[in-house]
Amino acid sequence: MYTRGKEPSFDIRRIVYGERYDSNILENDLLESGYDVINRTIILIGEIPFGILFTKKWALLMPDLLLAVDQLQDYELLRDASLVRDKIRELYVFENISWEEYLRGELSPENTEAISNIFSLLRRQGIYLPYLKGCKALDRDLCKSLDVLLQDAPDHTFKAIFTIKAIDLDPKVRVATRGAVKSDLLSLISNGKCCKQGVGCVTGLPNQTCYNCNYDTPDTCGRPDDEEGETDKISPSDAA
């Protein structure tokens, strides 16, 4: 959690709890750590459009990532900031590589393994950046969702998942983002807060069955009614 007076401009908890938000009242450790993961991701890459994030060479992304690490340290969101910096600097060895090339398996097995190990160590520090899962089926699904994301939502961002209502999105963008979440291309948490469970529409990406349920009132839901996302909204009674 944050040092008093050093809260970042964006905290997913403010969206989840709205007017009920109180920085002194905490959920259980699992949910709190998940919220911190989202906040770290937004500070690191949250405002970079997906079309740039996944295709830009790491040499051009790394300076901004290192500056973001300084912010994370200021907000006391890192246990070992030096280790995080060191791991991100190790990516400079692969400066002419993009996330897209890495995720599509276009590198040598040795380079792919080395990069995956870096991302694995970063996850142990609570930083979840896009990474290969090491399972052919999962990585195939991840690449499919990347294709759709780059085609249909290149201007969308990780932060926008939480700040733009699903009803205001082009249906293709909503479905593309939902697919990226489902494949874990974009890593999020489930906090179980969803109008499907009768607790009203609550933002913060509740869970996979109620994607992007970020509405101001509980009378509509942002979850597409099927895997293709053809139904734009459902009522709480339908979702029960």
Image: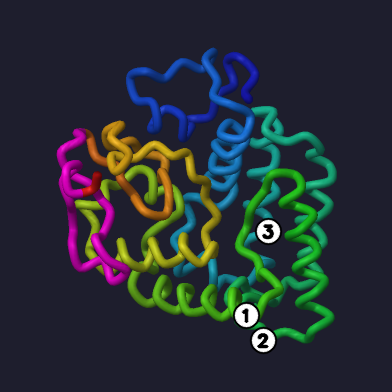
Q: Earlier in the sequence, mark 1 or mark 2?
A: 1
Residue 36: quadrant of the picture: top right
Q: Which residue matches tag 3? A: 62
**Residue 155 disc label:** none
Query: Label 3: how many residues lie within 10 Å, few (<14), some (14-19) or many (20+)?
Result: some
Q: From mark 1 to mark 2, how far is it between C-alphas?
A: 5 Å
Q: Which residue appears at 34% of the width and 25% of the height?
A: 18
Element marked by disc 2: loop
Q: From mark 3 to mark 2, how far is it between C-alphas?
A: 20 Å
Q: From mark 3 to mark 1, how far is it between C-alphas?
A: 16 Å
Q: Which residue matches tag 1? A: 101
Q: Earlier in the sequence, mark 3 or mark 2?
A: 3
Q: Position of residue 127 (x, y in %)?
A: 67, 48
Query: Label 2: how many residues lie within 10 Å, few (<14), some (14-19) or many (20+)?
Result: few
Magenta stretch secondary structure, dominant:
loop
Q: Which residue matches tag 2? A: 106
Which of the pair 23/156 is nearer the observer?
23
Where does the magenta region start and end?
217-238
Q: Which residue appears at 42% of the width and 74% of the height?
A: 150
119 sits left or right of 130 in the view: right
Report if the CB atoms under discs 1 and 2 are less than 8 Å apart: yes
Please count the marks in the image: 3
**Structure colour scheme:** rainbow
181 sits left or right of 211 in the view: right
Element marked by disc 3: helix
Amino acid at circle 1: Glu
Q: Which residue appears at 84% of the width and 46% of the height?
A: 83
Amino acid at circle 3: Met
Q: Specify whether residue 24 is painted magenta.
A: no
Q: Position of residue 139 (x, y in %)?
A: 60, 76
Vertical side of 78 occupied by 210: above or below: below
Amino acid at circle 2: Glu
